[in-house]
Image: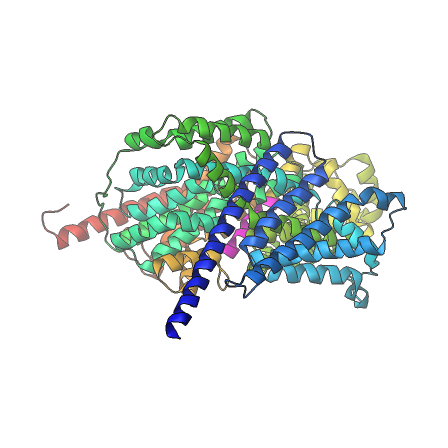
Amino acid sequence: MTETAHSASGQALEAGLRQQKLLRRVVYWLGVAVALLHLVMNYSTWFPTQWQAVLHYVGLGTMAVLLYPMAGRGQSRGMLWLDVLFGCVVLGSTVLVVSAEDAIYARGVTMTAFEMALALVAIGGAIELTRRTTGWVIPLLILLSLSYVSLWGDWLDNIFRFAGLSVETLLFRSIFGDDALFGSIAQISVSFVFMFILFGAFLVRSGAGDFVIAMSNALAGRIVGGPGLVAVISSGLTGTISGSAIANTVSTGVVTIPMMKRAGFPARFAAGVESAASTGGQLMPPIMGAGAFVMASYTQIPYTDIVLVAFLPALLYFLSVAFFVRIEAKRLGFQPQPQEDDKSFRQVLREGGLVFVTPISTLIALLVAGFTPTYAAGFAILTVIGASWLTPRPMGLGAIADALALGSRNMITTGLLLVAVGLVVNVIAMTGVGNTLSLMIQQWAGGSLLLALVLIALASLVLGMGLPVTAAYIVLATLSAPALYNLMAEAQVVQHLVAGNTLPAASAALVQLAAPDLAGSLGQPMAPTQAQALLDGLRAVDPSLVTGLYDQVLSPTLVTAILLSAHMIVFWLSQDSNVTPPVCLTAYAAAAIAGTSQIRTGFTAWKLAKGLYIVPLLFAYTPILHGDWPTALALFAFSAVGLYAFAAAFQGHLETNHGWGVRLLLAALAVALLYPNAPWLHWLGLAAFAALFTWDRRRHRRHSAGNHPGIS
């Protein structure tokens, strides 16, 4: 009896393994097919734009059905077929309802009961697939949004009251609207995002990941705290080829975290460094996650312009993490250590640089030359394949298929998220909730840009507890970026009035009506309070009179720069969900590798990632994003020193340990170096910091000589 039971159990296990092997093979070739389909869609005109989004959703949804089963499936073959049936019904309904678009318009935008049922199944399926791949928060947010439009919005009695739409209208707009399930965000996912994720997959398969670690080791391995700096550099470089902070953490962390622990860094600090650095990978051009492509769509600013100005701020962030690493290494008394594989930078570059440097350089050159991101990514993929044939690891058909499958698989979560989140954005656009909340933020902030930044940072923190970074940015940008833009633009108009510049004739006439006691001051220098009172008078008559001044008074270049700054601030603040407890996924991944507490690792990563909050202040108050290059480089240099002073104040250590007196002095120097529009204060802060650093370095040497006679 026992032997029979064992035999049956063994047969069941063997059958389960065969099923899993078959499933992996099916998913693999599905991934290859989905990637090839996207190449055809992006480089031909065979498919209308909406159908590209539909096929994108169907392809990734099919893979998700097989890879992300419903809870409790285990090894059951019956549950597998239930998943397959679910996929066929949902994805088939999606294709059928989109196919009926012409018939719906022919009937005067009227849907039959069957078409409404198909739309309902398609929307419900998108919600369920998103639940499987990202968890419950986004599905609940979608359900909350849709029910607001059709049900409880009419129950409210304040500014958020919405009379409601019929179920038919809601279903039609959710499928066919410009911001809906297959609208603009889904189309960004089809083109830019998929192609760049695919490019990253080809780089990984070609061996570029190994080169990144080796090059980071060659650059920083011999410096004090070198293993920690290797983690920072490798995560930054991996960020140029990866659109996922978690993938960045896992791929580089399995090497860098044990390396840091062996060097003597505490395990929690090592995991925090990897988590904070990998989060920065989302900020590093040229990929910058999916958010940069969405930002380009929202602002209508070319993607190339966004990644070009994003480089220096991203470098500032990585420097801020590196400063914490160096200070911790000095605090622990580390000395430079020879590495196990002690290759020179030139040797590493010669051995593996072709598979990384050549494709990345090609991509950047094509973007700068004005080619579309989709074209540049496709050509860069060909460059990866060609460059691999000049190395010991040429990419044959098998490796190319592996990269195609990997790219599709890496895209599942992001792609389904970008499709589904269109339902939320569609509701915000239909109801005007975004404009309402934006006005409320302006009102709560009382005209203070700093207070508005604090409010948006708090909102991003709350959203980030449940939403992935890209979704958090999309929602937050829709709701709060207009408020930031208005506050920053209004500040520029105030400066215009304070300087005594005139207003256009039409606006001057309106001032006569809205604020007659201040109208006589036009064209003359006035106090900031007077200028603000003048704008408040115009706003009391009609808020659009103030917003209309932006285009009349400010140059188009400045208006574009302010819009970019507002969205870049939101984009940076959205990243904090990766490192902020209680939900900090990169910290969780790093903690699993390091064997440390997830929450405590999250707090360590949050401390090390303070650049996420400091650098956006530069976007708001300085021209680092839109000034000329000498101005941007000067701001970068002063800000870098300011960030070092901040890290030293936070850690209580410069070259030696210090008490609160020196820490407060360092904090004051950090503020001076980061303070906007005060060059004289920057130079004064730099001189004071240099003097303090030199004094402390000599103090450290005297202390070392006293403890170790004969050593200087």
Vertical comparison of 522 with 11: above or below: above
Vertical comparison of 603 with 237: above or below: below
The magenta-colored residue range is 567-579
Residue 232 lies left or right of residue 178; in this view the side is left
Residue 244 lies left or right of residue 99; in this view the side is left
Numbered-mark total: 0
Q: Is residue 70 magenta?
A: no
Secondary structure character of the magenta stretch overall: helix
Q: Quadrant of the N terminus?
A: bottom left
Give the x, y percent position of residue 554.
Answer: 69, 36
Q: Is residue 639 visible?
A: no
Vertical comparison of 696 with 638: above or below: below
Q: Nearer the viewer, residue 462 or 31?
A: 31
User: Can you tell which quarter of the image residue 154 is in?
Assistant: bottom right
Q: Quadrant of the C terminus?
A: top left
Q: Is residue 399 visible?
A: yes
- The residue lying at 23 percent from left, 38 percent from top is 342
Residue 436 lies left or right of residue 468; in this view the side is right
Give the x, y percent position of residue 617.
Answer: 53, 48
Residue 298 lies left or right of residue 312; in this view the side is right
Give the x, y percent position of residue 376.
Answer: 55, 29
Residue most toward the bottom?
1
Q: Is residue 571 magenta?
A: yes
The chosen color scheme is: rainbow
User: Can you tell which quarter of the image residue 184 is in?
Assistant: top right
Give the x, y percent position of residue 249.
Answer: 42, 50
Q: Nearer the viewer, residue 289 or 408?
A: 408
- The residue lying at 47 percent from left, 34 percent from top is 400
